[in-house]
């Protein structure tokens, strides 16, 4: 695959992120929360803490973190039916919320959390590609703020986190590897991927799909390198948001 870099939203280079912002404490009634914006994609992430754990963990002294994900009806322009009106979430919703939960659990010390459950809810206000990645990145901020609050209130002796998590999309469009795809790019990509990494560069999950042309190992390496650079920028943004949220 080779080609000329296509024109991108916000006049970005191939390795450029869309304009990013994380507003901590967006939902005052949640234990931890953040509104994350990645270009035109906006997601509210909240972390709510409850005493008790799933039955299979009861008595273990260990906690649990789980996630739920949803898109508001008008988030894509054409009204999306609410899951509750269908009686169950669709397959995409289930897949994404499982990904968010797996990603966040990768940096949680469940023994330090004790027998508590943290529910991380990610609600998409507006979607223009990368909603699952925004949910993971913003969800990490909400989770971290919730845990810091538990420590400050004396409910926990120490922070039950072993690191941080962030995620970004990337893909190949017109033969060119690109970082942080918006919807237009994602819908025409030959390859699209979502990469979840820890703050120290460890890979947690890589989802990559070749739509028309098989993905070469070289291009996979290119995409992972793009993702690593983008996640470094996202991590810095997370640090600023957490500091602001605890000031």
Image (cartoon, rainbow, N blue to C red):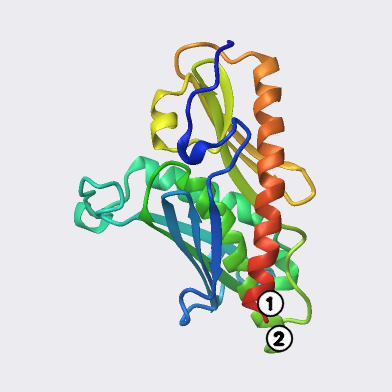
Q: Give 180 or 135, whichever is nearer the viewer.
A: 180
Q: Position of residue 223 (x, y in %)?
A: 65, 28
Element type where label 2 sits in the image: helix
Residue 187, quarter of picture: top left
On-image quarter of the N terminus: top right
Q: CA distance from mark 1 to mark 2?
A: 6 Å
The residue sitting at 51% across, 54% down in the picture is: 135
Q: For numbered disc 1, what is the local secondary structure?
A: helix
**Horizontal arrangement in the rendering, residue 135 relative to residue 14 (left or right):** left
Quarter of the picture containing the C terminus is: bottom right
Q: Residue at x 59, y 33 (%)?
A: 13
Above or below: residue 164 compared with residue 185: below
Closest to the observer: 234 or 111? 234
The mark found on residue 23 in the picture is none
Viewer can see residue 106: no
Q: Position of residue 67 (x, y in %)?
A: 50, 58
The spot of residue 86 in percent (x, y) is 21, 51
Q: Is residue 88 left or right of residue 59?
A: left
* Foreground residue among 208 and 185: 185
Find out whether the residues at labels 1 and 2 contact each other: C-beta distance under 8 Å. yes
Q: Which residue is label 2 attached to?
A: 152
- Could you say where residue 222 lies in the image, as x and y percent from the top left? 68, 24
- Is residue 46 rendered to the left or right of residue 76? right
Q: Is residue 135 above or below residue 227?
A: below
Q: Can you identify the residue that label 1 sits on? A: 148
Determine crowd level at label 1: few under 14, some 14-19, many 20+ residues with C-alpha closer than 10 A: many
Q: Is residue 86 left or right of residue 71?
A: left
Q: Could you say which quadrant of the image residue 52 lies in?
A: bottom right
């Amino acid at each position: 695959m080779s080609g000329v870099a296509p024109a991108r939203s916000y006049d970005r280079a191939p390795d450029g992120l869309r304009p990013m912002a994380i507003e901590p404490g967006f939902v005052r009634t949640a234990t931890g929360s953040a509104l994350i914006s990645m270009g035109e994609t906006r997601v509210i992430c909240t972390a709510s803490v409850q005493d008790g754990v799933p039955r299979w963990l009861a008595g273990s002294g260990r906690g649990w973190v789980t996630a739920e994900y949803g898109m508001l009806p008008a988030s894509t322009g054409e009204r999306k039916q609410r899951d509750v009106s269908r009686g169950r979430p669709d397959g995409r919703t289930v897949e994404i919320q499982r990904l968010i939960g797996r990603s966040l659990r990768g940096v949680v010390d469940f023994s330090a959390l004790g027998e508590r459950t943290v529910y991380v809810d990610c609600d998409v206000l507006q979607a223009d590609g990368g909603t699952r990645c925004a949910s993971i990145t913003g969800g990490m901020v909400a989770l971290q703020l919730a845990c810091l609050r538990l420590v400050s209130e004396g409910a926990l002796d120490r922070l039950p986190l072993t690191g941080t998590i962030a995620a970004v999309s990337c893909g190949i469009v017109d033969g060119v590897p690109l970082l942080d795809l918006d919807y237009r790019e994602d819908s025409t990509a030959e390859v699209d991927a979502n990469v979840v990494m820890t703050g120290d560069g460890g890979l947690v999950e890589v989802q990559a799909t070749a739509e028309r042309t098989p993905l070469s190992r070289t291009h996979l390496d290119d995409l992972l390198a793009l993702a690593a650079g983008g996640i470094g920028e996202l991590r810095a943004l997370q640090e600023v948001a957490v500091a602001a949220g605890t000031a």
